[in-house]
Every structure is written in structure tokens, then in C-alpha cells.
Amino acid sequence: MPFSLPAGGHLAALALSLTVALGGTAADPASPFGPQAPQNPATAANGAATMHGDSASSGTTPHPGPGTSAIGYSRTALASACPTVVVGSDGYVIALCTTIFGQTPTVHLLDPVTGADLASLALPKGSLFGGVYAYLDNGDRLVVVDGNNNLVRVGHRRAGSGWTLRIEHSTPLGNAVPAGDNIVGLTPDWEGRVWFATSGGVIGTVDTGTGAVRTISTGEGVQNSISTVPGRTAVATDHALYLLSAGPDGTPVVDWRAPYDRGPARKPGQLSWGTGTTPSFFGPGNGTEYVTIVDNAAPHGNLLVYRVAGGPDPICRIPVLTPYARSGTEDAVIASGRSVFVTNTYGYPYPALPEGAPASQPSSASFEGGLSRIDVNAGGTDCSVVWNSPVKSAALPRLSLADGKIYTVSVTGPTGSAGLNTFAQYHHSVIDPATGAQLTSSFLGIGLVYNPLQMRGTAAPDGTLYQGTETGVVRISER
């Protein structure tokens, strides 16, 4: 049996089918999920503006994926891991990658028809995560912090018969980032400020018009991105989830702080000791009622869901990925409507860890994969597991609100560190969000060049899926 449903799961699937038939709260009749997260006026269109799709970090897209029919695919070799792939209003694809040799953050412009690398721009090197989190602004410029702690906007322009990438605006952050610290998370708010969080726990805002920078310090580490919805910013440290707003001068204000179980140690398959998830906003009304993370409790992490307006007490704390002896996640969840989807990364080997990452306990483990779906009840007072699926996802899944399917890259074969980079087989996989069943699986390739490193694919408006890998970007489309 390809998936499992706990008691009541069949009723949940039936209810979902009825919701689709009746229209429900779907963003599209094909999907019972949604609504889509609010469109941030400072970013490109939702779905392809950030690694997680939007500034709410919902993990959804309003665009269809390649579907379940035969696919065609091509690979753009960049000798880099490419975690952030975004798509501008002109259709051109921008990837923020980190070179394999030297770990230099580099921006690439890709041809939307062929996937060819049209132009590249290397940025000053900073931390490992300086080459991970960025966003595309409403002018199709990639916003990122370089290794010299300058917040830069990288634009693309035609240059004769070719293309060029160049820094169009730069704002120095100065002493706002302490010596030896580095910026991890980056996202804009609705007033045009850019929020950031550093690995050392500084949370700040930047007014790129005036250059004003305002900060507070939590004294706790941050190793994941941050999220915004109107009037609210969420930051998960290695000890607690913070919900913040901006004071009159832009200084971050803590609305509430919710400590969580960070577990006895870093788990294998995670990059830091604490939550591995970026906070995600979601909800059935306007997409902002709830915010969620997964803690690092042992042996299984717990999904924690909070009512944004309700303070630091979660409406539910529920163990996830329990079919496995031990579980944990380094992946941001998918969160849409009343549903949250969690991926198991326990045991997944990474080629590099953030500087200062503590040893994991145990030192290694086998990667078993698996996904869980959890729903908040209609009253917003509790949560329950809808299904567990054994799909071994090697990428961070994406939910299409247009076609009602989850897209990811699954892995078969040997999945130890050597196996993932040499003999493991990678497949474009489509999952039914109503049941957890794998609808189709299409072979992509073997080993290092196709390893997606738990990075998230991005769907363009035409349904083409761009998946970052350890060595470049794979372009997947319906044949």
C-alpha cells in the first residue's frame, strides 16, 4: 500500500473531494487548498518571488506544474548548488547559487526557453547561508546581502546581443551586523522596509531609501529564513519562535515569543541545533491567521501551530512523521488553507554545514524520507494527522494551487552520503495532497549532478519547473 491513512483519514479524503466539487476555498477548482498568501507589494508575483514562493513562506505556487503526463527535461551545469531560483515578470529565471569550489555566492540569469546560462555575477563571499536566502523585488531585481554586509539589488539588462547582471542599488548595513556575524534571513514588509536576521540573533529593518537600519538582539542563533505578512514578521531562532512588528521608527518590536523543544542535540539531516523550518504563515480566511514551525523534539519533531493574534500558546503541538523510529526536518513546510505538509530529512547527508554547527547525535543515520499532512480543525482549536506517505523526498516539495498537486524530486537506491552523490537515482515525482499517494515518477538522473539537496523547485507561469541541484539547475516541462 503506497500510503497510510490514520483513523478518519478516509473521511478526510472524502471531505476534500466534496470541497473540490463544491468549490470550497480553493484558489482554483482543481485544488481545495488556499487561499494564496497575500501578495507582498515589494516582491515579484507570488509563487516565484522567493525560495518558498512568497514572503509568507507558504511553499505554494499559483502556477501549475508539469502535471502527470510525460516530461522533458534539461540540465544547466553551473558547478554550484542553487537553492534560490526565482522568475521575473519578463519570464527570465534568476538563480542564486553557491560555487562548489570556494563557496562564492553567484547570481545567474537563465534563458526561460532553453535554460542556458546567459549571464552571471559573483558577489563578495560571506557565510554559507549568504548564498541561500534572497528574494526578487517588484522590479525583477534579486535582493541579497553580500559578504561585505551590503544589501544589494541585482538587475538584469540586455547588453548588445547578450545580457548582463549588475548591482543597481546598494545599502550598507554598517555596524548593524556585529563583526563575525552574518545575515541569514531576508524579506520585505508591506511598508517597504527590508527585514533581516543574523546567525547571531540580531533582527533588524533597513529603509533602503534613507539608509536607516534599526535592530534588536535576541541572543539566540538563527539558521533559517524569515517571513512576512501585512504588519507581521516571523523569525525562528534555535530556541523560540518570535512574532514581531515594526515600531514608528522601524525598530523591531517583539509581539510575542514562544519557546519550543529544541531537543537534546542537532539531529543528523539537520544543519543546526533547533528547528530546521522557516516560519510559515497560512490560514483558510486570508492566509495569515496561523504561523507554524516544527520543533526539534526527540524522537519525533512536533508541528506547532499558533494563532497569530492569539499569543505564544500553540493551538496544537502534534508529533509528525511517526511511522519512523526517529524523525526530524530541515525543510520549511508547505502551509495552505488548514493544511500543513512536513518532510522528513532525518539522516539526509549535506556536503557542508554552517560554521560552528555542533556534532549531531547520533553522528549519522540512514535517510528514510517520508511526508506527513496535518490539518487544523475547522474551529482552529486543534490539529490531526491526515496521512503519512513513504515517498522519499530529496527536495523540498511545492504545492500547486492551480492543479492541486505536490511536486518534488524523490530518490531511490543507496541514500547514504556516498550513495546520494554516486549511485542514487532521482525522479521528478508528483504527489496527491489529498491522500499522499505518489501519482507519477519520472527518472531524471543518477548521482551528484541531480542531487537536489533538499532545495525547493519553482514553477514558472507556463508550468515549467526549475529545480536547483548540487551542481546547477534542472528545467522540467510537460513534453
Image (spheres, grey):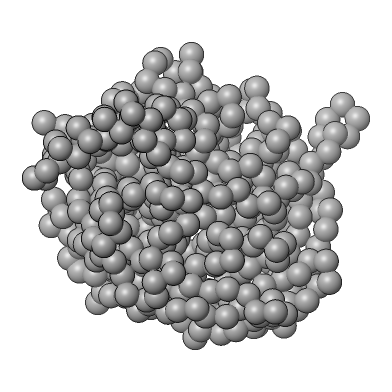
Q: Is 254 placed above or below 112 here?
A: below
Residue drawn where x is 35% and y is 43% of the image: 394
* Residue 102 at x, y percent in the picture: 61, 57
Residue 390 location, quadrant:
top left
For this view, does 24 lie left or right of residue 376?
right
Which image quadrant: the N terminus? top left
* Residue 362 at x, y percent in the picture: 22, 67
* Residue 37 at x, y percent in the picture: 51, 48
Q: Is 10 placed above or below 38 here?
A: above
For this view, does 265 lie left or right of residue 286?
left
Residue drawn where x is 84% and y is 71% of the image: 210
Q: Is 375 placed above or below 362 here?
A: above
**Which of 277 and 26 lies nearest the eye of the viewer?**
26
**Which of 13 and 145 lies nearest the eye of the viewer?**
13
For this view, does 48 lie left or right of residue 58?
right
**Which of 136 and 312 lies nearest the eye of the viewer?**
312
Residue drawn where x is 67% and y is 72% of the image: 205
Residue 424 makes an appearance in the image? no
For this view, does 362 lie left or right of residue 4?
right
Residue 77 makes an appearance in the image? yes
